[in-house]
Image (cartoon, helix red, strand yellow):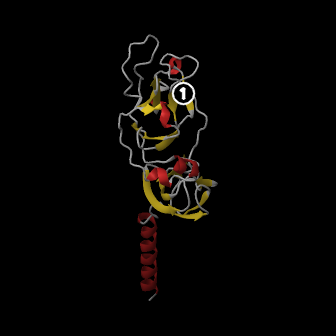
Amino acid sequence: MRKIILAVLVASIFVVSCGKKNDPTPLTANFEVQVTGEAPNAKISLVNKSISATSYEWTFGEGASINSSEDETPEGITVDKSGDFQVTLIAKSGSNQEQSTQTISITGNSAIVTYTDIALSQNLRDQTIGRFFSTSEGKVYLNSEVNATTGPLIDVAYHGFSTFNFFESPDNLLTNTIPGAVTTIPGTTNTKIKKFQSGFSVTDFDGMTGDQLLKDLTVESDGNTIGSLNFPLTVIFENSKGKKGVIKL
């Protein structure tokens, strides 16, 4: 009887031991996300619930105060844009990795960037006032500052003569032969610009607090000029990254 009990006991130990070696806890990417408040001051809190991970890679959607993080649980993240917002986590262990993405809804209004009192020159070769503007940098570039580094940053070019004014896509400047004038911008992209009867009123512009009106814009280039007697008015545009904007003149 003792031999039978011993044989069963040894067999049981052997089975349990094999289970531990061949059944490791699988790598899992998992997290919870909670939103507090509304855009443009929404805050997101994260709880990392991943299993068997040794490192982490987070990426956050447009409007977040940070683009990415390798912290186990990033903190202090704010979102200034309303609408659908994505959070992606890649959990890693050695050469293995697992990914989890969640889409959450941010309520409120999206923040807008406003630049005021921007001076643009009509003179094609003006070296004191520029005619090339970057919405991402909030800067006007002189002719002498246009190069392969600044070119991709430029969204709109300005040109005027007599009583007419133009806003041009930086990749489609008016052809001219004036010495000292910039005729091409290296590395630039296309911007759609609607200059006549934009459908966006000065009252709309003055009353903007969020980007909802900009979201609803449909921008198609019209190639028109602006008469000097039509002010105040608005010009709408959409750059190559899909960012929409309004210029009030």
Q: Secondary structure at mark 1?
A: loop
Residue at x-position 46% and y-position 86%: 2
Specify the farthest residue to the front: 229
- Image mark count: 1
Quick one: 131 or 1, which is closer to the camera? 131
Q: In the rendered image, which residue does mark 1 sit on?
A: 120
Can you give x and y, in whole percent of width and height, for residue 9 in the image? Answer: 46, 80
Q: Crowding near pointer 1: few (<14 within 10 Å), some, many (20+)? A: some
Query: Residue 110 lies in what quarter of the image?
Result: bottom right
Residue at x-position 51% and y-position 56%: 53
Can you give x and y, in whole percent of width and height, for residue 117 in the image? Answer: 61, 34
Q: Amino acid at mark 1?
A: Leu
Can you give x and y, in whole percent of width and height, for residue 206 in the image? Answer: 57, 48
Note whether residue 204 is visible: yes
Placement of the N terminus among the 4 image quadrants:
bottom left
Quick one: 74 or 186, which is closer to the camera? 186
Residue at x-position 48% and y-position 59%: 83
Q: Is residue 238 left or right of residue 33?
A: left
Quick one: 106 or 230, which is closer to the camera? 230
Can you give x and y, in whole percent of width and height, for residue 60 in the image? Answer: 51, 52
Quick one: 29 or 115, which is closer to the camera? 115
Above or below — where is 102 with respect to 66?
below
Specify the farthest residue to the right: 76
Specify the farthest residue to the top: 179
Note whether residue 74 is visible: no
Q: Is residue 167 left or right of residue 113?
A: left
